[in-house]
Amino acid sequence: MAEKIYWKGIEEKEQSEGFRQIAEKEFMDELPVLSSITEPISTGNSSRRDFLKMLGFSVTAATIAASCEMPVRKSIPYIWRPEEIAPGIANYYASTFYQGGDYCAVLVKTREGRPIKIEGRNLKNARVTKGGTNARAQASVLSLYDGARFKSPKRGNENITWETADKEIAEKLKAAAGAGKVVLFSSTIISPSTKAVIAEFAKSVGESKFEHLVYDGISYSGMLDANEKSFGKRLIPSYNFAKAKVIVGVGADFLGTWVSPIEFSADYAINRRVSNDKKDMSRHIQIESVPTITGYKADTRISVKPSEELNALVDLYNVIVGGSSAKNAKVGKAAKELLDAKGASLVVCGSNDTNAQLLANAINNALGNYGTTITWDRPYNTKQGSDKAITSLVDGLNAGTTKAVLFYESNPVSTSPVKGLADALKKADVVVSFANRQDETSLVSTYVTPDNHWLESWNDAEPKAGIFNTTQPTITKLFDTRPFQETLMKWAGKEGSYYDFIQQHWEANVYPKADHLGLFWSFWDLAVADGEVEVPASGSASYSAAGASDAAASVTATASSLGDAQVKFYESIAIGDGYWADNPWLQELPDPVSKITWDNYIIVSPQWLVKNGYSFDGDFKEKRYYIGKLTVNGQTIELPVVGVPGTAEGTFGIALGYGRQGIQNPELRNGKAAFQFLVNNKDGNFTNVAKASIEKTANTEQLAITQTHFNITMKDLGGVKTRKTVKETTLHEYKKDSMAGNEDRKEILEDMVTLYDKHEYPGPHWTMVVDLNTCTGCGACVVACNAENNVPVVGKDQVRRSREMHWMRIDRYYTGEVDNPDVVFQPLMCQHCDNAPCENVCPVAATNHSSEGLNQMAYNRCIGTRYCANNCPYKVRRFNWYDYQQADSFDKKWGTDNNRPLSETTLEMHEPLTRMVLNPDVTVRSRGVMEKCSFCVQRLQGGKLEAKKANRVLTGLKLDTDGTVVEYGDIHTACQTACPTNAITFGDRNNKESEVSKKFKDERAFGVIEEIHTMPNVLYLTQVRNREEEKKYEVIDYYHPKA
Amino acid sequence: MHAYESEFREPLINGLDKNYTKITDDLVAPTERITPLWLIATLITGAGAAFFVFCLTWTVWFGIGTWGLNKTIGWAWDITNFVWWIGIGHAGTLISAILLLFRQRFRTGINRAAEAMTIFAVICAGMFPIFHMGRVWDAPFIFPIPNTRGPVWVNFNSPLLWDVFAISTYFSVSLLFWYSGLMPDFGTIRDRAKGKTRKWIYNILSFGWQGTAKQWQRFEALCLVLAGLSTPLVLSVHTIVSFDFATSVIPGWHTTIFPPYFVAGAIFSGFAMVETLMLISRKMFSLEDYITINHIESMNKIIVLTGSIVGIAYLTELFIAWYSGFLYEQFAFYNRILGKYFWAYAIMMTCNVVTPQFYWIKSIRRNLYWTFALSIFVNIGMWFERFVIIVTSLADDYLPSSWNYFSPTWVDWGIYLGSISVFLFLFLLFSRFFPTIAIAEVKSIFRIASEVSKVARAKEAQSATASTGGFVGLQSIGPLDKDAKN
């Protein structure tokens, strides 16, 4: 019998549409909660009760809001808004960064009249730096807002007015000129107008009474002297790495610090890029002692002691010029390769020994490189210093002939090895420093007449002969400072502003040479807008072998005098000669080689470290290192001893520029000063190599290192080699198979199946591809990211606790033997996985997936469980352990307690002045919130908006055939534009024509640990080394282990 | 010659002088007087609990940075403690629910204390997921509360959200179960109470318990229903906690074996903690007759069983790591055993797998000192198990560039030791004001008639032996088994 069905009404029996609609709903009626929200009060049937409720609520809410103490916001509206400033819209101004030999053609991004970010100028207006930047240029914007800047002129410790300063100093200079000489002591000046101002000033003092001494802390004096001997010109010629097929570097870190690293990186990269269309690349051999990024990028790195660097040069000379054989077989081989590439080769030498540089000149000449890879048409102006300048200054002061010294962009008390300079300066009648922040020299000066920051100044620059740049102010001066040039003009009794002076100078000197059709004014406007003007140049020089043969003997003698253990003092990528030591971004930038921040240390070979009992805390649990006491010529220095793979035994390396006691903030005085160890060579220049001995002390120190290598003790299983984190191959293999080194990816892609629905990306699908072959690990991108995304500085103690906040880091992996490994640099930011492990696990959905493939963070929603960071296989998420950014969530005073977790530097970054550097487009994250790379989502949105406003499709990155950037288009990330080698490509993968989608499909492309099915949107291109020996990168197939 | 007596079972309550009044007297006594030992212990643990509050305040005030965590290791002692405490709670539920359903009557001696322990352990456990949040003031975000923030909703895919439901359910059911069992006993205390206030308070606490047949009937029914509800919780709660790890991608976490392995481990650690506490309170409140060696032996048997299950799970993990052929998994376990945290793994293996095996020996099983020592070992071992899983897996996962090390700060120590103090402090308060042993339930396993006759027989035998001049101990008449007929 059929089951009986009961019904309770006709509607139910008939199952009418209306009934079913009601029956399917959980509640018969609309929920009252929703109706009261959705129904407009005006049209709805709101009762008197509702009105009273609303009234009650609003009154209460208003009372509560009014009774709370509201923070006072100090914002002042424009009375007359400048025409070009629209709130919320960034303006870009072409300008020029130059400091102590570092030159970079830049665009300054300003928001509401504040410079907040430095970008590279596009290629056609950046003939030297080719659109790239370096870490120092990127970080220089932070120094503008440094609270430690001088706020007015000073006499001793006393603040004075400019009138007083001008009056007193002018009188004293006059008196000094009567009694002796007035010396202007500066680092290299590349501004032609500044030089003209100095000439005016010299005239006013009396030319015989005036002397301009040029001294650079990081000296190229030996090289300049050698060029003077060989070519009759005390200049450095143009090096063209793009034309060189074989490059041999002898202790020259040309990708990091040597001469013009941004330019060299860009040129070098052109020949290092490989693709299916161009399966060829240059060959780079680096002979060096203390490891540098240049050495780590080389195809073959010959690891030697500093003395052997010199001997290698002699070997090269003997083989190439003399035709005899080399003592070091490896060097002999390099020489042979050079000879095979005559006219398309390059030998660069980093030594400051004139004789060594004479040998390098002789070698390059014998190879026929002058005129091809080395040209004299546009020599560099960026290195003009002479080491003799400092000795002559001290001598002059001690002899009483120098009565007045003016220090401009120079801090010789800290950056020279000469002892007694501070005492000698006391003998002068007047010492004036133009420094804009307190430094060691300003501390011993009688007057400080602070110069503007470069972002506040007009200036010009001629980095290479005939390439003229302009610097324009992007903000009114923040303090009562005055451009150095105007000060000099004033003292010279010349009226007018420096701006007018530059114009006059250009009208007289640059405009006539330039090929410009219009009047000067149009020329000038164009120059300022573009930032750069090129005038024809046709310099040449002929080589003379003077002194070359004696040089070989002299270099050999120098090398043998260095003994078994030697120390080399090197320039660090971040800190330079110490000028940048007070820049927190650069202090916290991990050294590309050692990954150590906030300190200098003694680099040794890891085997030496173990053999001599310095190994401590092998697991790096505490990041603790033994302190060694290094003795050089009777002076000692105590620093932690760190093993760096690739350092030759018997080599010690110490970075210059740290331990600057003149800096106000004690935390930025970290490390030990080392300039005093430079030795005066026979040729009058300071050599950075010396005989040394070391003693172990019982003390240890914790270093703030960001990447340790726990795997040292666990080679057999899970060592870096077997993990496919990075992939590399040789050119030889790559020519045979484009997928060489990346063979396992085919299978990984085949295995990538899922039962679940994939995300859909109807619009763009943002993707990044990083070419490991051209990434040099220089760190420009890291600092650019800090600036763009308001990444906080956490200080040394927090980095020791592994809490640095960098959104992108550069991982460094070694393969091969410890004494001379191969190195791969891998920039790692959020991989924006299409199947992101972090997204699933957030209980509040604070991190989620956008329809454009971004893995995005809703900071306001984040409750800080840190599960996402734990579950991120790339460990790119960063947690705000403390209120690093002073995000207004807590009272500021809490940090000044007796137990202060925040460093001095972090607190300084909280100052309203320093916070002016923050990018207003990026949220400042509060304590307890997770953050990470957003693919610069603010730029993506901005770019899309631009395209929408213009009613056109998004324009993407355009690359030249050689891989250089023609145009970035609407969309670009901060790391991408900062990169001097264009290693980072970014764009829309859904656009099949885009550069990134082409690279995404390249056979070299691979994702990091993509076998766990994260489907990352950041792919890397295999590193290819141009090497003969078939040292194939070992691929261990852990899916199908061999029986 | 004598009536049949089981030689097999030991009595559940010892002592020849027991009767219903005596039981009531014995069990209510601790609530009616303060002993100096109790006072000292309460003061010490109270201070510890205050320090716990201080450390949490410190954390909220300054930030999670006051802990030893870093960019690689986002969870360490916080979640270790959380899982440890949740696991400890499991014994109470198992004893009260599953043993009730299986009619294991020995449970009556220990169930009340074990249930209280569950409550306090869950309270301690619950602190960690709350206070490990970077922004604890936004903690309500994890509840699916309708809001006006637009489509902002919780993420039902996240195991952390499952945790929220699992633990809150677990806590409410355990609390109900515990409290409903307490009601008749509060009635007993009220009836004995001298002062008016005391009477009033216990009357409120007992919800006006009258002891009528209808009440007893409903009480029994409620206990069974709650037991039925709790039983799946014994398995589900720790299963869901294990999902926090099992559903992730981190080698060493991403393991399907976790649910059974965690549940076994939870019962293992829970029983050890019950033993630790019972051995102390047994001594402190002179409850030796009610918590007998028999109880302890039974629990030790469960410990050796669950300990061995845990041991097998450890070995299975190792086997699977090898068998998977997956480098990262293999490395994770290689690293656990031989890596920088080898000592933690060694402690875990020793305390959880090796030392419980002593319980195969009967004399050790029945030895109070051994039991106490081994229960501590298990507590330590199980803490390290969670530490090993959480910290060693996170410390060295996929990318060697991020590998790191965790060292605790004083705040970590303070919160950990503080949570133990909170637990003990609450337990001491409980034992002072609430009956530690379920009076009504204990009475249900006490047979007065057989007891009286046995006492009589014993006296008879003694006098007979005395007249023949020889000495025959009580043992000669067999165990005084009150449950012989069961």
Image: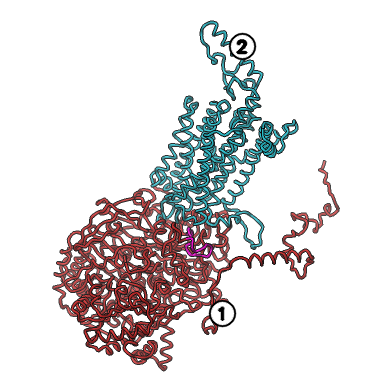
Label 1 vs label 2: CA separation?
Answer: 108 Å
Q: Which of A277 and B57 is in front in this view?
A: B57
Relative to residue B348, is residue B301 depicted above or below?
above
Task: State the image coordinates of residue B389 (x, y, percent, origin top left).
Answer: 47, 46
Q: Which of A268 and A924 is in front in this view?
A: A924
Residue lying at the far top of the rendered structure:
B468
Callout 1: few (<14), some (14-19), or many (20+) C-alpha neighbours within 10 Å? few
Q: Residue A819 carries which label?
A: none
Q: Chain A is drawn in which colour?
A: red
Relative to residue B53, is residue A105 depicted above or below?
below
Q: Is residue A412 left or right of residue A127?
A: left
The residue indicated by pointer 2 is B2
Q: How many labels does the image show?
A: 2
Q: Chain B is drawn in which colour?
A: cyan
Task: State the image coordinates of residue A683 (x, y, percent, origin top left).
Answer: 17, 74
Stretch of the chain drawn in magenta: A877-894
